[in-house]
Amino acid sequence: MTMFKKFAPLAFSFLALGASIPAHAEFDDSCFVEVAYANSGPQHYDFVAFNVVNDLGVSRSITLTSGGHSEIIDKLPCSTTNGYYISATPYSTSMNIIKEIPSVGLCQLKAYPVLLGLQVNSASVVFPDDFICSK
């Protein structure tokens, strides 16, 4: 009987741990968004800052330089109910920061919100082709 008393708390601890693992297994952060700056269009910018956010508070950002390559914004939680809003903010180093400071999220993705619902779902966006800018 004393042996049972010694191992019972340990056994219940393992059961509690085993029960909590499936609860956290639902969280899957394998989704990602690939962003690129095509450097096309009538206006040239030195940089484009991309923002990926959702209503649950997930927020990721990355800045690309002109003529650069695409980048991945990864470790985004996959969700079939909470879409991601993708925006871009173009700016140049030659801008007069006081007079011409760009608004964050100046350009919105034409099709949004983007649902990344299943494991390793992804989206690819290109600035300026996939965005509508309000400037």
Image: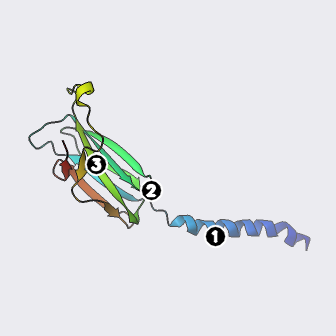
Separation of marks 2 and 3 at Cα, in angstroms: 17 Å
At horizontal 81% and vertical 68% (from top left) the residue drawn is 7
Q: Is disc 1 in contact with disc 3, using a CB cutoff of under 8 Å?
A: no
On the picture, is 135 further left or further right than 27? left
Label 1 SS: helix
Which residue is identified by label 3? 87
Residue 91 in the image: x percent, y percent?
A: 23, 35
Judging depth in this view, the residue of 11 and 65 nearest the camera is: 65
Vertical side of 26 occupied by 128: above or below = above
Question: Which comes before the other along the chain, label 2 or label 3?
Answer: 2
How many discs mark residues in the rendered view? 3
Label 3 SS: strand
> Most extreme residue toward the left, as rendered?
42
At horizontal 35% and vertical 63% (from top left) the residue drawn is 116
Label 2 SS: loop
Mark seen at residue 19: 1
Query: Within 10 Å of the Cα at label 2, are there few (<14), some (14-19), or many (20+) other Cα atoms?
Result: few
On the picture, is 131 further left or further right than 31? left
At horizontal 11% and vertical 44% (from top left) the residue drawn is 40
Query: In the rendered structure, which amino acid carries the disc numbered 3?
Result: Ser
Query: In the rendered structure, which amino acid carries the disc numbered 2?
Result: Leu
Residue 48 in the image: x percent, y percent?
A: 24, 40
- Quarter that holds the C terminus: top left
- Residue 98, by quadrant, is top left
> Most extreme residue toward the bottom, as rendered?
1
Of circles 1 and 3, the one toward us is: 3
Separation of marks 1 and 2 at Cα, in angstroms: 25 Å
Vertical side of 101 occupied by 88: above or below = below
Query: In the rendered structure, which amino acid carries the disc numbered 1?
Result: Ala
Mark seen at residue 60: none
Mark seen at residue 56: 2
Separation of marks 1 and 3 at Cα, in angstroms: 39 Å
